[in-house]
Each structure stands twice: as C-alpha cells, then as structure tokens.
Image (cartoon, rainbow, N blue to C red):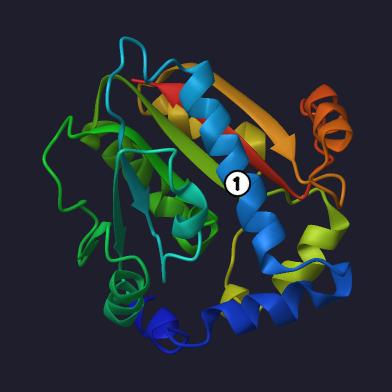
Amino acid sequence: MSELFDGYGSSYGEAVARSIRFSGLGHDFFLGAKADLLRRLVDERQLRLGGERVCALDIGCGVGSLHPHLRGIFDRLHGCDVSEQSIERARHCNPDNEYGVCTSNLLPYRSATFDIAFASCVLHHVAPTSWPGFVEEMRRVVRPGGVACIIEHNPFNPLTRLAVMRCPFDEDAVLLGARKARALLVGAGFRQVRSEHFLLLPTPGRIAKAVERGLAAFPLGAQYACSARV
C-alpha cells in the first residue's frame, strides 16, 4: 500500500478533486466538515475538562491535507502513514506538527500516549482481516478515558460509491458501514460507542448542520463517524 500512495505524494489533492468534481464541491468542503466533527467530538467527550491539553494522533494521515483545518482543535497533533513520501510532504506543509512513518502493523508510539486517535477514510484501504488489529492498536495508544474515532465513507450513499469508483487509489477499497465500525470498536474493548452520518447537504450553514444532526442516525450522509471511549 505504501507504494500506491507514494505514487500520489505530490498529486493526492488533485486526484481527490477529480474524483468528487461531479458534486460541484471542493475537497476543502469535505475536510472542513471532518474538522468540525472532530472539534465537536473534543467538546462533547469533554477532553478539555479541567483545562487539559489535548494530544491527538491522525492514523493514516497521508499528506496532511486535513491538518490545516485542525488548527486550534488540538494542542499537539501527530500524524503517521505507511507512505514515506506522503509524510515528507506533510512535514513540509505543516511544520508545527509531528510526523512518523509506520512500517508495520504496530503503531510507532507507546501505549496510552494520546487523548484522541482518529483514522479518516483509512480503514477501507486496510485488508478486512486486519481491521480488528488496526482498531486494537488505536485503543492501545489512547490513554484511559481518551477517545478513538473512525471516519469512513458511507457505502449506502450512491454518490459516495461513485466518488470511490472514480478515485484511482480506491480501486481496491473495501467499504464498511457504521454497524461494522461500531462492532470493531466494541470488539476491541471500547465503551460508549456511538456513530453519526454527516455530509448530507452541500453547504456548511447553521441550518444545514442542524438538519444533518437531526438525520445523523440514518445512513444518508456521504460519510460517517464512529467514536468511543477507552
């Protein structure tokens, strides 16, 4: 998999933009929606309770496209990926963050290091037989009381399937629904597992967000997020 993403290290954003061009929306719209969700997750899961500083890990961060949108959400942000070229670009574009290359199925971090670990549209690139181990590693690196979050494509949304079909590095993608993601988190020993669908409406306005929140339980949005506490 590292060879595949090494090949897109300098053109990742362009490839994604082409795959979603039919929607009339730019890549930043989708990145902003994910950032808003993570910001809300930090608040709702009370990770800053008592003025605590929040240290986060982005597993499978790629070239770090999401990271400019995360400024102000986390006090420290680490990113790791199997693609060395992607990590080099992430370091260049986001010099305030810390990055590392992950060369095995084990994350290169000590246990109970992070307040939150998240994987954004990563798991569908992992072989299904490795999904349980991937989620168990997420749990290992999160401190007790911390949170893990899986953000994935919603396989029940036809426009999402079209975007995946058009994306050159999603050729071997195996999409998983929110029910499967929840089951993986439960199986790894997480608690307080919940999921929500988002990216239903093509606007970031307050009314649109309120509508999306009201329909979050239904598999309508383009993507979903499953979060849980250690």
23 to 192, vertically: above or below: below
User: Can residue 100 be spotted in the picture?
Assistant: yes
Return the x and y of residue 138 as percentages of the image width and height: 32, 39
Is 229 placed above or below 12 here? above
Name the residue carrying label 1.
Answer: 34
Instruction: Choose top left, top right, bottom left or bottom right for residue 160.
Output: bottom right
Q: In this view of the protein, which residue sits in the foreground, 122 or 176?
A: 122
In the figure, residue 141 lies in which quadrant?
A: top left
| Relative side of 172 to 84, left or right | right
Q: Quadrant of the C terminus?
A: top left
- What is the number of callouts on the image? 1
In the rendering, at what x and y percent does residue 153 appear?
Answer: 67, 52
Residue 137 drawn above or below residue 102: above
> Does residue 166 appear in this view?
no
Image side of residue 41 versus residue 229, left or right: right
Task: Give coordinates of residue 183: x percent, y percent.
Answer: 53, 29
**Which residue ends up furthest to the top in the rendered image?**
50
Residue shown at the point (14%, 34%) measured from the top left: 111
Residue 97, position as x, y percentages in the image: 27, 57
Left or right? Give the position of 161 relative to 109.
right
The quarter of the rendered structure image containing the N terminus is bottom left
Q: Is residue 103 left or right of residue 196?
A: left
Kind of element beneath mark 1: helix
Please determine whether, in this image, residue 134 is positioned above or below residue 18. above
Q: Residue at x 11, y 40 (%)?
A: 110
Residue shown at the point (27%, 27%) measured from the top left: 53
Packing grade of label 1 (10 A; few <14, some 14-19, many >=20) is many
Residue at figure coordinates x 68%, y 30% from the top left: 196
Q: Which amino acid, by three-letter code, is at mark 1?
A: Lys
